[in-house]
Image: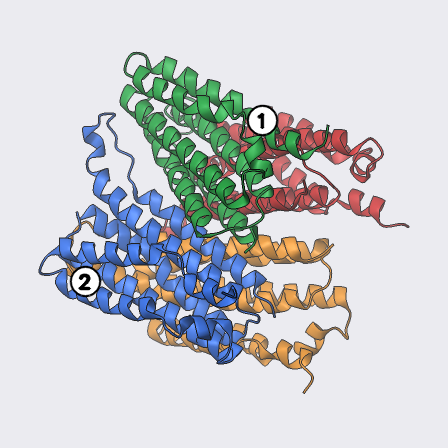
Chain colours: A red, B green, C blue, D orange
């Protein structure tokens, strides 16, 4: 069984997640620039989450590109990832509407952490199916980004209660780190 | 006429259903952990429905994989299934927001029951089109899961008024039972 | 330029339209069966619109199946149809929440009428592109359904102010009439 | 890496954007024609944005049709465009609900401007990947529409504070100008 429909369904879910977050930008009743002020923190948290969902979509895209077959385990590991991504709109809106307060920032970090773990599980399940010599296995050999990200998320969750801005800085750091597209797979595919 | 566009449309609808359920998680106005408490039952009912929609998507995926052609009857049997699935967000939110009270639990069971019946009808309509020797017909020969699920749903609907937790336990039981992907079709396709 | 992406985009929009209508089913705060009563008319109008969008999707599916190329005119005629379909959720909710009152029923009829006209325009634009001997042209030769539907809609709009139930009966009549899938195209393709 | 999945994801996001705008049409509680009056300006701004998203979808469709490969830069330039398009529902609703007041009109212009810039960047990034002799490069050689549109948007943003109707007229002018589908690419592909 090929990956086409799994990709199509995942694309659909991620496209909806990335778009319905915008529904949390409450339209102000007044027409002044001042009325936009309460929207600003929600917009900023939206930008952060938009980039994160974009990163997941991009890496998911690369990962399934080198996956040849789908079995039940891959299908459910993928749904598990989509579940945590589907909590992004809630966590994003709660964080934004409370101006990046400690607790929503920490919960946002928990959702990021769980999504990272789900992505890691999905990669392992695919590698187990494809064999230890598959492109993905070689690409994930030196997966320092995948290993360091959860550590930073855990640090950010703890630090949120000390300084929420430090936690936010860590979230942005991880996003920037991943914004460089996952060249590991490209590097293994393309002969140098 | 092939199954491609029917799959694409069904994928789209199921991707939206699974994702808009998350809009029922009302973002709390306060930033404390306490403020998350009323969200918890809605989150739990969301997890249950997410798994159910995942099961339907997965089985639908397997079923259409062995379907060669689509006619009007299949098309409408499929829309009928999507209709009942589209009531999941409503039933899920009502059940979650009322802390799994008897009546919403029973109604949730009714929606599950109707979706199961719609899935059964879709399978029969495809088998009638494909012929009694098709892969699907052989796979559904010993369809004990498909036969026992509606019975459990009916039991759960009745039991909801005795103990809603017993009803919930039955919903979880059916979900776990189906979580094992529909190997019936795989078994028939793959020569042993 | 092929029809693949036009179909994909149209499928996406129609899948979203058919699903977000369900968001208008307001989740009641109480857990009793009585609390479901105000939801009932909205549910009934949802069923009607679900069937109508299903009909449009099904016929759209048949129509593009026999279309070989897409030009700018087809692209915009298609977007024009999607625009009127996108007003279904609004018209459906307004009609349902006001228990099928005269004015919302008439406006619902106007949206149905405009969608029918947009579908007619799309068919004509495709036929102009494909040539007068194309499958679609022959299939639409005796298009009595397409010709009678707008007439019934106009009658329903006027009758809504006399008896809204008569108008509803006409809407249901047209839906049932179309529920029989558009065999005209199948008849022309399949040699008898 | 091909463009298929990038197109599918973009189609999904644009289909959702174009459809969720309709959720901003608040269903009136009363059943009279008068109750529809406050919906009218939101409907008008919806029509404008529907046409704009349609234009972006159509041109995006043409652009990716002549793109052979996708790299990380194209992927993120595309997400950048989708980000600005995702702000359309917010800007549209704010403008409509405030009856096209100066500030929301100006902000709407800013979102249009940023989307135009993002589209320009995406085109440049694709041309850099495809080479200076690619179809897109030749098509964009005399890209007067792409060059004049941002200038008109900037003018409209400034003029919104003088006369918001003048600004609206400029928005409509640009939309009409683009409604003529991007024949530049077709002209280069089709030998004359």
Residue furthest front as drawn: C192
Q: Say which quarter of the image contains residue A154.
A: top right
As measured in the structure, the alpha-carbon distance from the residue carrying label 2 to the one carrying label 1 is 60 Å
Is residue D82 or residue C50 the one in the foreground? Answer: C50
Q: Which residue is mark 1?
A: A157
Q: Residue at x 43, y 54 (%)?
A: C14
Left or right: D35 with respect to A80? Answer: left
Name the chain letter of the residue that bears numbered label 1. Answer: A
Residue C156, label in figure: 2
Regarding residue A148, the answer to whether it shows in the image is no
Q: Position of residue A177 (x, y in %)?
A: 71, 41
Residue at (24%, 38%) from the top-left corner? Answer: C39
Image x and y of residue B36, in percent: 41, 25
Kindly identify the residue that appears in the image at 67 percent across and 38 percent down.
Answer: A174
In front: A124, or D98? Answer: A124
Q: From where the camera sits, is residue A23 visible?
A: yes
Q: Is residue B109 left or right of residue A67?
A: left
């Amino acid at each position: 069984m090929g990956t086409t429909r799994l990709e199509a369904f995942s694309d659909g879910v991620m496209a909806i997640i990335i778009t319905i977050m915008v529904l949390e930008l409450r339209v102000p009743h007044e027409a002044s620039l001042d009325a936009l002020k309460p929207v600003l923190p929600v917009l900023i948290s939206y930008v952060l989450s938009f980039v994160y969902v974009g990163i997941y979509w991009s890496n998911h895209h690369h990962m399934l590109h080198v996956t040849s077959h789908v079995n039940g385990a891959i299908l459910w590991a993928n749904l598990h990832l989509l579940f945590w991504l589907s909590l992004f709109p809630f966590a994003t809106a709660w964080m934004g509407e409370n101006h990046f307060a400690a607790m929503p920032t920490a919960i946002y970090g928990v959702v990021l952490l769980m999504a990272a773990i789900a992505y890691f599980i999905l990669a392992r399940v695919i590698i187990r199916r494809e064999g230890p010599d598959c492109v993905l296995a070689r690409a994930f050999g030196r997966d320092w980004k995948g290993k360091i990200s959860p550590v930073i998320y855990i640090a950010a969750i703890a630090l949120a209660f000390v300084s929420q801005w430090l936690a936010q800085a860590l979230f942005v750091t991880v996003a920037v780190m991943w914004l460089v597209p996952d060249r590991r797979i490209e590097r293994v595919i393309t002969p140098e």
